[in-house]
Image (spheres, rainbow, N blue to C red):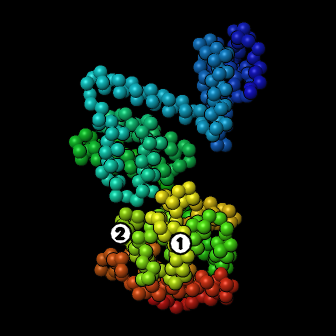
Amino acid sequence: MARYLIPADTTIRNAKSRPSPWRMPDGDGLYLLIRPDGAKWWRFDYSIGGRRKTLSMGTYPDTGLKAARAQADEARAQVAAGTDPSDVRKEAKAQQAQLLDVKRRIEQGLPLEDSFEEVAREWFGRHCSGLAPSHSEKIIRRFERDIFPWLGTRPVNEISAPELLAVLRRIEERGAVDTAHRAKQNCGQVFRFAIATGRGSRDPSADLRGALPPARKTHLAAITDPKEIAVLLRAIDAYRGFYPVRAALKLAPLVFVRPGELRLAEWSEFDLDAATWSIPAVRMKLREPHLVPLARQAVDILRELHPLSGGGRFVFPGGRTPEKALSNNAMLVALRRMGYTNDEMTPHGFRAMARTVLDEVLGVRPDIIEHQLAHAVRDPLGRAYNRTSHLPERREMMQRWADYLDELKAGAKVLRFPGRTA
């Protein structure tokens, strides 16, 4: 509860202007700014995200003492909830502008189906249906959270570059520069789709080159020192949390696929007798099917897990219902419980771990490693390898890698191999 300092409206009415602006404080950030010309402006100071900000709350007497305090109380509640009152106000204004725009178009008999949101959802339905669910969900959430509230009802052919930039700036200002760049790219795809379907004439995102700060390239944390890898492997073995999470963590370093490819694994994709895992193209980043040879240790983990989840679809079912796979954060949370921070290790870090050690310690040929990582590897003639390329060499590498991890975990001496194999 705020502690108010202004006793009554009469105090404000009797306040005189001075040669320079001065403040009449009311407590907890709310004050009346009295300017030399006699104008009296309500202001509210607050801090959010480490930044000091000021919100205007109208002028006196149009906004009385009671109304100003009510606005300040609402703003304080928003700050306490982690919401910037300035963003709330901007969104409300944007929504009001959209409603007025819709009303104008209806009055002028203009069609509403060419709004940015309508075109964007049509583009999404046509072009994102084949993407991995985790990827497509991020795209539509990005539109719904950061773009549609401001541009959704705007005619797709009337959106200007400055208008689009203003929306992208909101994303940038909260520190999500990478997201701003992805949103700009997605918007450009929608505008080009509108042009191709006869509902747009140009792509305003093309005029924004250089308008946003460069995206920061970050590398997900990974442990690559053999001694630290040994400690991590022992910690995973000692983990006593949800069993499918423990099994996923034990399998992750042996297969070093992307976290989404692992947690969404289905039993139908595995041939344990042949020791292979065939990941369908729909779940792969490059939209190509991927074959993972399984070391003996990986097969043992899966056979041990099979009595628990083998009767269902997912290898690693979620805790609430077996009809769904583990959540995005299940493995990450487990690593945190084992004491590993975001700066030390992530589920994606098992890929960097394998890539680094296989190359620098075990001396495996880089092209074999890259192919097993499902990267875009090409032969000297520029042809892409298929899913079975170098399968014998990759199978040998995967078993050697699993044996090496066992040696590390057991405390065997770590040796460096100067030559390359496989």
Q: Residue at x 47, y 80 (%)?
A: 294
Query: Is residue 354 shown above or below 205?
Result: below
The foreground one among 313 and 395 is 313
Q: Quadrant of the N terminus?
A: top right
Quadrant position of residue 203: top left
Count every numbered label the image shows and give the total. 2
x and y, in percent, of residue 351 in the image? 52, 72
Quadrant position of residue 283: bottom left
Q: Residue at x 54, y 30 (%)?
A: 89
Report helix, strand or loop for mark 1: helix
Q: Quadrant of the C terminus?
A: bottom left
Query: Is residue 24 shown above or below 361?
Result: above
Q: Amino acid at mark 1?
A: Pro
* Residue 182 can be seen, yes or no: no
x and y, in percent, of residue 177 in the image? 51, 50
Q: Nearer the viewer, mark 2 or mark 1?
A: 1
Report helix, strand or loop for mark 2: loop
* Residue of label 1: 307
* Residue of label 2: 288
Packing grade of label 2 (10 A; few <14, some 14-19, many >=20) is: some
x and y, in percent, of residue 208 in the image? 40, 46
Q: Residue at x 49, y 53 (%)?
A: 178
